[in-house]
Image (tube, helix red, strand yellow):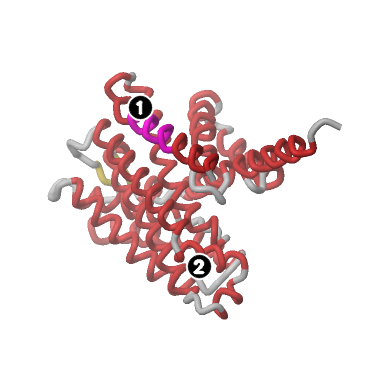
Amino acid sequence: MLIKDSRQVISLFIIIGLLIVLCVLPHISSAYIVSLFISILYFTSLATSWAIFAGPTRYISFAAAAFIGIGSYTTAFLVETLPMVFVIIIAAVIGFCLAAVVGLATLRLSGIYFVIFTFGLTELIRQLVLWFEINITKNLGRYIFSDFGRPEIYYGLLILCVLTFVSGYILHRSRYGIALRTIGDDETVARHSGINATWVKVVTFAATSSVMSAAGAIMAPRWTYIDPHIAFNHIVSFEIAIMALLGGITHLFGPVLGVIPLVLLLEFLSTTFPHYSLVILGLSFLLIVFLLPNGVVGVGRSLMKLFSTSGDRGPS
């Protein structure tokens, strides 16, 4: 117990130290480093929220781009009339409500059927927005003019990441988190145990989707210009899934271990091999699924178990 408590204290000090470094980073680093960390924080919030739902329930969603696009368009419509804080909150509420409606209709599906529906959801919303822009507003793309600059985007994403991690930590240790894991292990057993599986899945899916909408709203001023093809990009959904799976979706901080190397890899590929980046991304997805089914966290746990077992045996 003492060893476990000491590890928790050390972990707490590391987290506090890391937060202090992240808070002062924009004041001591170049614009390029800050932009790079904006991408890391952006994908960390997305991959972590994705894993909070997919990890325990084992429902793989490719609808992330739909909620990111909703957040982006919320900013595009409201940024010139409302303070950015209210715009982000409204985007999160819209994302939550839409995900709740979608969840009620689809979370009775499982396996490949749910994956296909969530993938199609992004395309459906993109086509609806495209029709609205062409036929109603007569304006296909939108420029975003805002005083919400690079520092504000950075700190907005940092706050969103902290809130996501704190919520995930509380969820994991709550009875609600146990219910989620029970659903993932065997949904039939969970229902017979008195768990309202549909309600638990819908609320979790909606809450994590609202984080994605908030992230899209925060990042929209950085993009300056959006249209339906930019805002609702299917590739982003795959990138988020790959990052979360690479790091490991069974641990709260697992996705971060996938986000950092893949953001750096995508940065390198986009500047060095722009025409082959998607091919390499697809190959990396296949390699992760086949070689690292439990992610980096799973490999680390296996190695720790191996070393602890060999240590217990002692010298022969």
Q: Is residue 260 left or right of residue 232?
A: right
- Count of numbered circles on the image: 2
* Place of residue 156 in the rendered image (x, y in percent of width and height, measured from the top left): 28, 40
Is residue 209 or residue 51 the one in the foreground? Answer: 51
* Place of residue 76 in the rendered image (x, y in percent of width and height, measured from the top left): 24, 48
At numbered mark 2, what does the secondary structure look like: helix, strand or loop?
A: helix
State the extent of the magenta-drawn residues as a range.
Answer: 12-22
- Could you tell which of marks 2 and 1 lies nearer the N-terminus? 1
Q: Give me the disc on residue 249.
A: none
Query: Which quadrant of the view contains residue 135?
Result: bottom left
* Place of residue 316 in the rendered image (x, y in percent of width and height, measured from the top left): 86, 32
Query: Which quadrant of the view contains residue 34?
Result: top left
Q: Give me the disc on residue 179.
A: 2
**In the current view of this chain or complex, which residue is farthest to the front?**
2
Work out whether 128 lies above or below 312.
below
Residue 113 highlighted magenta (yes or no): no
Q: Is residue 240 left or right of residue 92?
A: right
Mark 2 to mark 1 CA distance (whole Å): 36 Å
Is residue 262 or residue 125 the one in the foreground? Answer: 262
| Residue at 49% over, 42% down | 5
* Residue assigned mark 1: 21
**In the current view of this chain or complex, which residue is farthest to the left?**
81
Work out whether 51 lies above or below 284.
below
